[in-house]
Amino acid sequence: MSNKIATAGNMGKKVRSDCFVTLELKDSGGISIEQKSKVQVMYGESNKKLCEDILSFFEIKNAQLTIEDSGALPLVIAARIEAAVKELIDTDKEYLLDIIEENKYTSEKEQFRFSRLYLPGNTPSMMLNAGIHDPNGIILDLEDSVAFNKKKEAQLLVRNALRGINFYGAERMVRINQFPKGLEDIKYLIPHNVHMLLVPKCEGADQIKQLEVKIDELRKQHKVERPIYLMPIIESALGVEKAFEIATASENVVAMAIGLEDYTADLGARRTNEAVESFYARTRMVNACKAARIQAIDSVFSDVADMDALRENVKTSKGLGFEGMGCIHPRQIKVIHESFAPEAEEIDKAKKIVNAFIDATEKGLGVVSLGTKMIDPPVVKRAEKTINLAISLGLISENWREEFLNEQAG
Amino acid sequence: MAKKYADLVKNAVGRMVPTEVNGQKQVPFQGVGKFKPETSKHGPKIVSCADFPEDGNKEVTSLKEALVKAGLKDGMTISTHHHFRNGDLLANKIFDIAKELGVKDLRWVPSASFPCHEHLIQYLEDGTIHHIEGSMNGPLGRFASYGKMRGLGVLRSHGGRYQAIQDGEVKIDIAIIGAACADPFGNANGLYGSSASGLLGFALADSQYADKVIVVTDNMVPFPCIPWQIQGNYVDYTVQVDQVGIPEKIVSGTTQITKSPDRLLLAEMTAQLCWEAGIIRDGFSFQSGAGGTSLAVGDYFAKIMRKEGIKARFARGGSNKYLVSMLEEGLIEYILDGQTFDLKGVQSMADNPNHVWTSPFTSYNYHGKGNFAGLVDVVILGATEVDVNFNANVVTHSDGLLLHGIGGWQNCLFSKTVILPIPLFRDRIPVILDEVTTICGPGELIDVIVTERGIAINPKRKDLIEALKDSTLPIKTIEELKDEAEKICGKPAKANFDDELVAVIKWVDGTIIDSVRKVKP
């Protein structure tokens, strides 16, 4: 390679928890590391060791490495240096820090996906605290929020984030790039316990099927046993027309979302608060999802300051049959959860059904009935979901059944 | 000139502190409420009306004339106040004049300094100013941290400053009080005029105990200036100048509720904790600072109070538009205000009889017969660092640099419940440590640390632990929080200190609670 200088990362007054690295390969003189860091006193020494370790891992013997650090964690520094190294050297080696124990959980096909928080895939400062806001899912985005010339370094940062940042139990999602570019993203994701991939601007079952082939190759190679779930995002008129085909393209498609910004642009219409222009697309998509027995997920609400309008928006969304929504600001999460929350009547009904189910199980009965009505298993399952949700939202206590029985008796 | 400091001993919180500072004997911190001086308060000289103008007109033509008449000379102690915050034009002008007159070795005792006072570094370098006793923010703190100041810095809380002046620990030769409004007799207030800042409480002690008092205003009104927050009977000279402060910088600062989702979460958790612990109840009182997170706590308090139909008897300011709107809505009966942070606050203080101005004497002075801070049910404060013994630091950063003043922070620790909502780490710098860099407040007075990753309650507060035992809030031990921060950030190396001291931190009773060491460049 002729190029001898490469850079990666971000710097500037507003940049935090990130670093900007400049790597220059030399012919002689050994390794020289220069740090300008706001945490020099506390982490200067350990950062230096990390830098040396990475360069030696990539078998670089002569180089000048400069780091302008605004408080980056080791996993960020490592991603930035690796990105610079890979600009200059052809290598398949990956410098991987340990995956933290807290990140070794899995997700379920059926779990709640009311809120999913979008995070730009090349902005570490937003990733660190995302989990504490308790979204159902966290999306590390490699697509629209990452500048074209930063795509490669974002892949490495997202990979390191999946391994090293605690998301406190949120479903671990990544939005890959649009087909076919997104196919290149997944080798940085599949081995690192990603739970779900969001597939943007999806326009046909074929795209999902091609993606699945690649995923399966990587799963075999890295011995990943559990499935990787998919959430295609419908963002065009063609996508809307193909909604059912996409929803049923694979058993790993467990939810499907709509992206209204691009869809309205495709229509040539203006996006309005009333959303009349996308009414057809939304109902069509919800219907396709229900027909395919998967979750229908709504677009994001972009006015992050207006919580009342968001609340209204979620009510409408729920009314149309959507089961979740995207968030672009952590403060939206709570409002979305509250608005998707089951209403009192729904909870009362669920309590009766679940109670009847527990009764029947205890008595060894195969059939659950409430009064004279037989209850089908899916209805029980749904009621259990409602109860669990109500508990997780603090609407009822974990000991609800005790209270329920007391009420019945009293 | 006296030595900067001498004879270090270990004090009651285990820190090495000098027993002599800038030639004055000092008492090491002995524990909360332990030190009880047996001496009398400082007595200023008796003066006679015969020596003052019969018509009450004490106006002189310029600040320079006033300083010369007040006898400005080498080695004097000069005091100023921070009512104009970062818009202050007065302090810089005073020392410009001192330089022009060739005066040396002045001791500057501001109630707080701001970045606008970076101008004074040249005078610290050339010897016009010998050293600063007062908060050192930003550039001045950096200057002191590298050991460049001739004398040792002395940091005091707002209440500690009143106590030190009252007790004669700091004898002020000339106090210069900038006022938004004054009359030629010297009555003054901070309420009216283009430099309005609300009140002049920080200058109260100086007016009562300084040898000479000069009032400077850009809004001279005929006698009487009503209300007289500063009484002209204490004042020697009055001066009218074109401008005492830059209005937009007086009321700027952190008067917006934070938009940071992480800080909002901290604020919400703090309010939730106060609600669940039964602190928010009819007739309660609170104080919440001017930072973005503290403002948000007030806002969440308001939401709970509205929903539950609760009224607070009083809130202590720093006031701002948010607190004022709570007063106007009837959620609070009184604001007892120490300083106003925006124009809405200034306006309310001028118009609303339930918005009352206070001073460090009424609110904070520890050598008084009680003070208001101790009567407050809950106070929300910040900190740069906290340690596993709940000791907290507000003046230095983990790299050792002295960058902030104490403000009323130490005084507020006497509130019935003290809560510090702070992030677990800031840009990789853990906030909860084995040991804080500088102890400003002893852990026995700090009750709850709220971080985004968990809440630690001081084991001394068994009542709070009991009240919150069924809470859904993430209650952890402080050691767990410390471990979590270190797990995310890595264990930080210690700051690189020289043995030399650059400043001492006074406790509210005038004893020394900790020393600040020189940072190696």
Image (tube, rainbow, N blue to C red):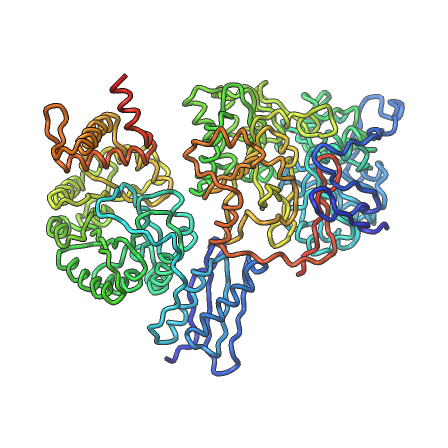
Q: Which residue, as the protein is rendered here, is positioned at the far top?
A: A410
Q: Is residue B112 left or right of residue A103?
A: right
Q: On the rendered image, what quadrant is the N terminus of chain A found in?
A: bottom left
Q: Tell me: A78 left or right of A303.
A: right
Picture coordinates of residue A26 (x, y %)? 47, 80
- Which residue: 12% across, 35% down? A366
Is residue B342 placed above or below A33 in the rendered structure? above
Q: In the image, is residue A225 above or below residue A109?
A: below
Does A223 appear above or below B278? below
Q: Position of residue A237 (x, y in %)?
A: 15, 50
- Is residue A286 in sight in this rendering? yes
Q: To which quarter of the image does residue B89 belong? A: top right
Total marks drawn? 0
Furthest residue toward bottom = A27
Q: Is residue B491 above or below residue A363?
A: below
The C terminus of chain A, quarter of image: top left
Toward which corner of the image does residue B44 lie, by quadrant? top right
Along the line of sight, which residue is nearer the eye, B76 or B72? B76
Q: Where residue B462 sits in the image (x, y, percent)?
A: 55, 31
Does the rendering let one see residue B342?
no
Q: Residue at x 26, y 33 (%)?
A: A387
Measured as percent of width and height from the top left, residue B493 is found at: 58, 58
In this image, B287 relative to A356: left or right?
right
